[in-house]
Image (cartoon, coloured by chain):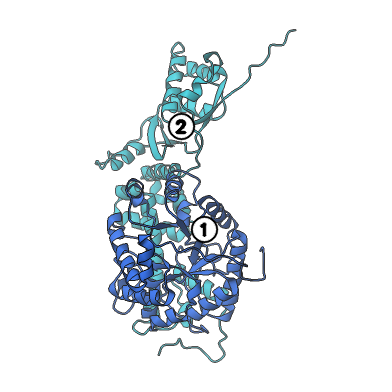
Chain colours: A blue, B cyan
């Protein structure tokens, strides 16, 4: 490991406010390049472009020439107790050098151990032991990539009996000790809060406002007794309500609609993104002024 | 009761323990992890943990469906799910990137009992894997007609050719290509046939689009020898032994023209002629 002594990166400037963006999906390449959609920036799934060549990288090169890009990974497995995959990290670093994203993010989760990858964002117990482990791993990745990363809260379905703190306290301590930024997925907070029976506003209140660099907005599937995070539907009203509370607490934060399945036409997502923009501009009039400039 | 029942002597499991148990629970159905979990306000820990169990299989099946759409179309949804489930059980993913998870599916199909009865399944899967690999294979410069014209005709016999990294040449014992093409064209697939000779199927990427076509036995031989570094003059001599010697240079030029037009080559190189040594 490059460094076993976790420490916040010194004097790293907070990533800039990017406005309102979308998760980049291959179905929309043509519409993006041939039209001028009302989208300020795009977030890309890092792994989709960690390939040798061909259309994915060619499209990404074209889109990054026109729009700010954020790289968002799903396989870093920051909380896994298995050592990092050196090839994966090297590919991630190489892609970041090529894309020059505004920042690189992944999730507070693990995806597998013992050499197996379950390709899911799996939950962790919020213990001091797990915190020390995650802090060490975040610090290692930041040293390796030579940049602070941003970590996103995931939707969870189970809680561990021996957790020692709420998720937001774990996250606050993680960012304090590593200097990492936070992606605040509003839908994920809503889903986890419902599944575990806590007030989602406690999550908002417990999250350090100065560390949040991005909001994710998405839809989910409500099964009465629990909610499954599907990211395949419109942002529901209750998530918009929580978004209002998040904007109120965190201020202007780069925001995307993140649709992973049932991908609608780009125009539909742009319309939905307009709702996010309208809400934020209603609550923060300076954003409207900024947009008119 | 919300919290899981625990004995007084129970020591909190480590993160490593938790991850091993949880992974085992997803892969094998072992329920030991449930003892470390809490019930939700409205759902039991069993129901809640089931979300992870269900998501695992369905996510990986979705990945395989995306990687092998025409194999799925050929065998039907139900049979594909059965094949995919067996593959997932036998081959848990060892790749960080889900892009490579399904790479071993064709080889898995070949090892199944039904492979001898339905050899076209393996071959359709191999074609689909080659298409997926061509799609995002490494970029390389393209040798076009202008690049070849840079060499004077008298030097052509001394030229060697480098293929694009995307090119894969397959040998099929069945008419898998015809079946694959029909499925791709949304047409009814033909009945399985076993032609007397193997069918040579080449897969590559032209610009950003994967291409698939059949090569004649002669063209496939010339491609393989060119790939091994044979000079164009030698390739013409080989074609002369394969079929009519008189038209061999014309046939070789025709194949080369198709490769250039299809952007299947990345470079040409001139091999210096050996100097004649006077005795």
Q: Earlier in the sequence, mark 2 or mark 1?
A: 1
Q: Is residue A67 left or right of residue A223?
A: right
- Tell me the distance, in whole angstroms, between the alpha carbons under discs 2 and 1: 32 Å
- Give the structural element (helix, strand or loop) at label 2: loop
Residue beneath disc 2: B264
Does residue B19 show up?
yes
Location of residue A58 by image quarter: top left
Q: Tell which tag, 2 or 1, sits nearer the viewer.
A: 2
The answer to which of A116 and A226 lies nearer the viewer is: A226
Q: Image height check: is B181 above or below B234?
A: below
Chain letter, disc 2 residue: B
Does residue B85 show up?
no
| Residue lying farthest to the top in this orientation | B279
Q: Image height check: is A155 above or below A23?
A: below
In the rendering, at what x and y percent does residue B260 appear? 44, 27
Location of residue B177 by image quarter: top left
The label on residue B94 is 1
The answer to which of B95 and B142 lies nearer the viewer is: B142
The answer to which of B174 and B215 lies nearer the viewer is: B215
Q: What residue is at 37 percent from the left and 76 percent from the top?
A: A190
Location of residue B257 by image quarter: top left
Say which quadrant the N terminus of chain B sits in.
Answer: bottom left
Say which quadrant the C terminus of chain B sits in.
Answer: top right
């Amino acid at each position: 490991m490059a460094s076993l002594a976790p420490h916040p990166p010194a004097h790293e400037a907070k990533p800039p406010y990017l406005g309102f963006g979308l998760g980049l999906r291959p179905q929309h390449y043509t519409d993006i390049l041939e039209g001028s959609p009302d989208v300020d920036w795009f977030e890309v799934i890092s792994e989709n472009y960690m390939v040798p060549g061909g259309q994915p990288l060619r499209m990404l090169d074209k889109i990054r020439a026109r729009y700010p890009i954020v790289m968002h990974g799903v396989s870093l497995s920051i909380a896994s107790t298995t050592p990092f995959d050196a090839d994966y990290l090297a590919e991630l670093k190489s892609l970041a050098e090529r894309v020059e994203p505004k920042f690189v993010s992944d999730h507070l989760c693990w995806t597998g151990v013992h050499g197996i990858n379950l390709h899911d964002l799996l939950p962790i117990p919020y213990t001091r032991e797990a915190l020390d482990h995650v802090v060490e791993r975040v610090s290692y990745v930041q040293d390796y990539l030579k940049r602070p990363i941003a970590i996103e809260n995931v939707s969870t379905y189970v809680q561990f009996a021996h957790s020692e703190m709420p998720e937001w306290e774990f996250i606050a301590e993680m960012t304090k000790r590593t200097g990492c930024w936070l992606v605040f997925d509003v839908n994920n907070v809503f889903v986890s809060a419902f599944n575990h029976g806590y007030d989602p506003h406690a999550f908002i209140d417990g999250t350090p406002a100065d560390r949040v660099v991005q909001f994710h907005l998405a839809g989910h599937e409500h099964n009465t007794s629990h909610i499954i995070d599907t990211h395949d539907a419109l942002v529901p009203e209750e998530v918009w309500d929580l978004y209002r509370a998040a904007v109120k607490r965190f201020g202007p934060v780069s925001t995307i609609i993140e649709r992973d399945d049932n991908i609608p036409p780009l125009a539909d997502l742009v319309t939905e993104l307009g709702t996010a923009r309208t809400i934020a501009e209603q609550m923060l009039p300076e954003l409207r002024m900024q947009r008119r400039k | 009761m919300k919290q899981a029942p625990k004995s007084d002597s129970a020591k909190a499991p480590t993160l490593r323990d938790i991850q091993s148990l949880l992974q085992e629970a997803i892969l094998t159905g072992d329920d030991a992890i449930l003892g470390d979990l809490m019930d939700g306000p409205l759902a039991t820990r069993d129901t809640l943990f089931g979300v992870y169990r269900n998501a695992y299989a369905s996510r990986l099946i979705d990945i395989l469906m995306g990687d092998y759409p025409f194999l799925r179309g050929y065998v039907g949804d139900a049979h594909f799910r059965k094949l995919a489930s067996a593959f997932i059980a036998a081959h848990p993913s060892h790749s960080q990137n889900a892009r490579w998870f399904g790479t071993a599916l064709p080889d898995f199909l070949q090892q199944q009992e039904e492979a001898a009865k339905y050899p076209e399944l393996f071959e359709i899967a191999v074609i689909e894997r080659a298409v997926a690999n061509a799609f995002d294979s490494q970029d390389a410069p393209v040798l076009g007609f202008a690049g070849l014209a840079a060499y004077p005709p008298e030097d052509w016999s001394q030229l060697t050719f480098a293929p694009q990294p995307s090119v894969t040449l397959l040998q099929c014992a069945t008419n898998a290509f015809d079946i694959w093409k029909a499925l791709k064209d949304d047409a009814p697939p033909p009945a399985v046939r076993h032609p007397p000779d193997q069918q040579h199927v080449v897969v590559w990427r032209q610009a950003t689009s994967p291409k698939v076509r059949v090569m004649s036995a002669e063209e496939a031989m010339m491609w393989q020898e060119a790939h091994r570094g044979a000079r164009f003059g030698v390739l013409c001599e080989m074609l002369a032994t394969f079929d009519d010697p008189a038209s061999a240079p014309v046939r070789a030029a025709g194949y080369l023209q198709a490769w250039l037009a299809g952007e299947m080559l990345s470079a040409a190189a001139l091999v210096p002629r050996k100097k004649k040594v006077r005795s």
